[in-house]
Image (cartoon, rainbow, N blue to C red):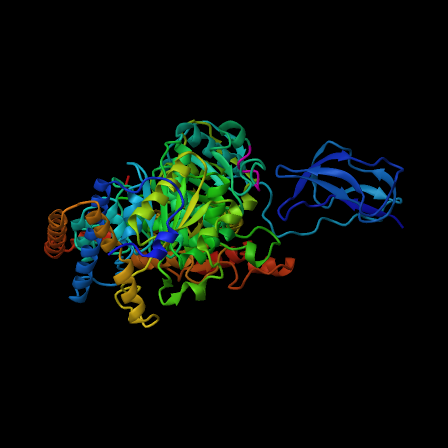
């Protein structure tokens, strides 16, 4: 299946070459890992092994994978509660993420954070935040630290189009522009803030222009195509790393599943979802691009098998890792000493 | 009929100031609204405008005079008025702290830091920040008016000059945004000091303080700490009404993952703020505007610091325990003085730290006095006094000879009118009455 015409039109005008063969293969693998991981998480949720809120990233994989490929070691990532994909893209282990979902000691937060609250300083992932919009100020703070230390790092701050209406988002735009902080603001516009479509929630019709009063350059990107994302991501990251201040990317994307596991998704038609899956799926698009580049089916099959094994292993681990000992209730409230 | 021109107050808590300059001479005719003089305090400079029209017949206070009391006549218009009105009563505490009687119990428990010198709470806070900023390049100060203006209450005076604009940064009026930004920076290991112009404005940012700063360590299984200080004046100032007069002690002390301190003296302020900056956890430092200008003895030792979580027995006594924090410690000390005249020996505990709370020191005291009175400016409902009393129930119930009593602010939003405001705040006579009631005198 080829890239749709709408997607191509939205592709930016810049001249950077598209991802090379190896990078696209890796992106394919990472997107597939997220897809299979999330499908498995959905299954485990259905079996009652995962509790509470569980927000799946299925459909949006190209956004984090394309952006991650534009980063350097040491750069930081922060996002909201729909965060499993971001963690896997950052290189966090599927085992640790899945075991956190099941609330086990082997999870990234020892079972104390859950789906929405995981972190890995080593991989530059700063959460995993449950309050809509809060991560935007926090991500601006990561960039502030980079500016303060003058270490050339860039912070990616993801949020949904729903969060983009929060007041602190605009406070953060102002602060980031005022102090020229190296932060890429990434609006993952999947069209629905829970059940409210973007048209019913935002008077702004082009969210990529939401930073314009502060002079923050922005662009709309086909978030269903990993190469488009990567291209725009490189441009945005380079802008920040050069000390030019923040950059805003609006990723036009789509989530196939409900807002969370408990969402019946009555606010949109089956046909709408079906159309996105069939005509715009990021993994299918990457697959087609790879085949067109001459990659053999067999090579993709090897990746499929590898991903399947990783996900199965994570699910096994997440069910066998013990629950945290009761003593964990009282630890990590304060740093002692 | 002439009138007297009185020394104006530039801020709700100003009690005196310097008459810096006269812009008019004796004999000159002045119009209403004309600037006639300039006044300075440690916080600000202001121009005095004439209210009435007339001839400036006599200047009573020459320019350059320091410590001119608010409402003192400074000049006469058209021959002046008959007797000048006496200064209006104010609800604020005296400008200088009462002299402290020796506190043997405290002296024994506390480390002796040697020689002291007198300084204001304001200077002590500034010195604490400066000392820690010299010690650790990761420490920086952000807030509204902290840099070029030198602090809305002049607490950060001189810091911009010493540390430069990267470490002392003015913020736009955007508490939610800059508090969140500072928390994010702290996640990477930097150590921000966030000044709220007053803690009332911290409510704009309370989600970041509680949900992000206080909880992330736990939610990350101990990976991601947040070494940050939120500081600023808390509680009632004077005549600023409900939205600017509120005590946040019980709000923040309620939350696990935070530490909360409330200094009274300049030594408390310096020692606790230094400890807060060094602490690897988020610490709320509840200061008090009225205390900023009060002077106390502070150890000169460069290393002086106080432990968070330890109360101080400010005055030893045997008949009743008065537990207070922040500005109420001053009132407790005054009450103890008055009670001594009536033959009641009161022990005064300065909590210093509200979370963690030094239960041991309170319990030890109540085991000796068998009576407890708590003081706080905040509301009674679920307040610090309620917590202290409950801890005594849990740990020293059998030692109580009377039900504990609390003296608190009235359970209403703070009124503006001077008489009502006075009624809404704890009063010395209430403390004395409560102490007499629990000692059955």
For residue A100, above or below residue A74? below
Snapshot quadrant of residue B393: bottom left
Would you say B256 lies left or right of A168 here? left
For residue A147, above or below residue A99? above
Q: Which one is nearer the viewer's eye here, B334 or A198?
A: A198
Residue A177 in the image: state x and y as whole percent. Answer: 48, 42
Q: Main secondary structure of the magenta part?
A: loop
Q: Which one is nearer the viewer's eye here, A270 or B73?
A: A270
Residue B351 can be seen in this image:
no
Query: Which image quarter holds the N terminus of chain A?
Result: bottom left
Would you say residue B74 sits in the magenta stretch?
no
Residue A171 can be seen in this image:
yes
Query: Which image quarter holds the C terminus of chain A?
Result: top left
Q: Which residues are magenta?
A: B152-157
Would you say B398 lies left or right of B174 here? left
The residue sitting at 31% across, 54% down in the picture is A224
The residue sitting at 65% across, 44% down in the picture is B15
Residue B245 in the image: state x and y as whole percent. Answer: 55, 54
The residue sitting at 43% across, 49% down in the picture is A219
Q: Which one is nearer the viewer's eye here, B396 or A137?
A: A137
> How many numbered marks are there?
0
Would you say A300 lies left or right of A144 here? left
Residue B112 in the image: state x and y as whole percent. Answer: 39, 31
Residue B195 in the image: state x and y as whole percent. Answer: 49, 43
For residue B344, above or below residue B415? above
């Amino acid at each position: 299946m080829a890239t749709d015409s709408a997607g191509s039109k939205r592709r930016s005008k810049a001249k950077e070459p598209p991802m090379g063969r190896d990078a696209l293969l890796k992106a394919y693998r990472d997107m597939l890992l997220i897809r299979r991981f999330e499908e498995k998480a959905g299954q485990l949720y259905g079996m009652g092994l995962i509790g509470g809120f569980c927000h799946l990233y299925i459909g949006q994989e190209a956004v984090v994978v394309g952006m991650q490929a534009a980063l350097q070691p040491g750069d930081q990532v922060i996002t909201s509660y729909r965060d499993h994909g971001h963690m896997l893209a950052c290189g966090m282990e599927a085992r640790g993420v899945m075991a956190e979902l099941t609330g086990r000691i082997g999870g990234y937060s020892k079972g104390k954070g859950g789906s929405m609250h995981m972190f890995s300083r080593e991989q530059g992932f700063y959460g995993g935040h449950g309050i809509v919009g809060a991560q935007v100020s926090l991500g601006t703070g990561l960039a502030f630290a980079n500016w303060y230390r003058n270490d050339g790092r860039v912070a990616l701050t993801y949020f949904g189009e729903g969060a983009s209406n929060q007041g602190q988002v605009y406070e953060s735009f102002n602060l980031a522009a005022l102090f020229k902080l190296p932060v890429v603001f990434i609006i993952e516009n999947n069209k629905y803030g829970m059940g409210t479509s973007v048209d019913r929630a935002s008077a702004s019709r082009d969210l990529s222009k939401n930073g314009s009063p502060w002079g923050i350059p922005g662009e709309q990107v086909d978030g269903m195509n990993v190469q488009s994302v990567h291209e725009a991501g490189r441009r945005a990251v380079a802008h920040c790393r050069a000390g030019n201040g923040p950059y805003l990317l609006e990723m036009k994307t789509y989530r196939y599943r409900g807002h969370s596991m408990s969402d019946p998704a009555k606010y949109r038609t089956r046909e709408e979802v079906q159309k996105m899956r069939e005509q715009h799926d990021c993994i299918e698009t990457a697959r087609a691009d790879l085949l067109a580049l001459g990659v053999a089916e067999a090579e993709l099959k090897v990746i499929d098998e590898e991903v399947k094994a990783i996900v199965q292993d994570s699910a096994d681990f997440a069910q066998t890792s013990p629950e945290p000992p009761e003593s964990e209730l009282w630890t990590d409230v304060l740093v002692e000493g | 009929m002439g009138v007297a021109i009185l020394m104006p107050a530039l801020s709700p808590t100003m009690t005196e100031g310097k008459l810096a300059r006269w812009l008019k001479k004796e004999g000159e005719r002045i119009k209403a609204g004309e600037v006639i003089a300039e006044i300075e305090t440690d916080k600000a400079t202001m121009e005095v405008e004439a209210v009435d029209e007339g001839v400036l017949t006599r200047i009573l206070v020459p320019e350059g005079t320091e410590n001119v009391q608010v409402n003192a006549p400074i000049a006469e218009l058209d021959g002046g008025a008959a007797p000048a009105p006496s200064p209006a009563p104010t609800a604020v505490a005296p400008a200088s702290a009462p002299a402290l009687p020796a506190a043997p119990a405290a002296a024994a428990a506390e480390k002796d830091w040697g020689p002291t010198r007198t300084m204001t709470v304001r200077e002590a806070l500034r010195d604490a920040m400066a000392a820690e900023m010299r010690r650790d390049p990761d420490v920086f100060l952000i807030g509204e008016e902290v840099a070029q203006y030198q602090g809305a209450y002049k607490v950060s005076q001189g810091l911009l000059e010493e540390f430069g604009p990267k470490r002392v940064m003015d913020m736009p009026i955007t508490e939610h945004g800059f508090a969140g930004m500072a928390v994010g920076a702290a996640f990477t290991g930097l150590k921000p000091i966030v000044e709220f112009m007053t803690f009332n404005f911290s409510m704009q940012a309370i989600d970041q303080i509680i949900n992000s700063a206080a909880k992330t360590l736990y939610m990350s299984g101990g990976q991601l700490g947040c070494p940050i200080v939120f500081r600023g004046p808390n509680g009632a100032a004077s005549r600023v009404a409900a939205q600017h007069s509120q005590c946040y002690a019980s709000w923040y002390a309620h939350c696990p993952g935070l530490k909360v301190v409330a200094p009274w003296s300049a030594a408390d302020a310096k020692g606790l703020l230094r400890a807060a900056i060094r602490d690897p956890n988020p610490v709320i430092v509840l200061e008090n505007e009225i205390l900023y200008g009060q002077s106390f003895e502070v150890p000169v030792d460069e290393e002086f610091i106080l432990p968070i979580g330890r109360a101080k027995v400010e005055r030893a006594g045997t008949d009743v325990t008065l537990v207070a924090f922040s500005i109420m410690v001053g009132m407790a000390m005054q009450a103890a003085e008055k009670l001594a005249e009536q033959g009641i020996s009161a022990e005064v505990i300065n909590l210093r730290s509200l979370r963690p709370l030094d239960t041991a020191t309170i319990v030890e005291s109540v085991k000796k006095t068998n009576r407890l009175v708590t003081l706080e400016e905040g509301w009674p409902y679920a307040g610090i006094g309620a917590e202290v009393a409950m801890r005594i129930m849990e740990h020293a119930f059998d030692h109580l000879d009377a039900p504990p009593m609390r003296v608190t602010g009235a359970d209403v939003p703070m009124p503006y009118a001077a008489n009502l405001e006075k009624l809404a705040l704890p009063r010395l006579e209430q403390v004395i009455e409560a102490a007499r009631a629990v000692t059955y005198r």
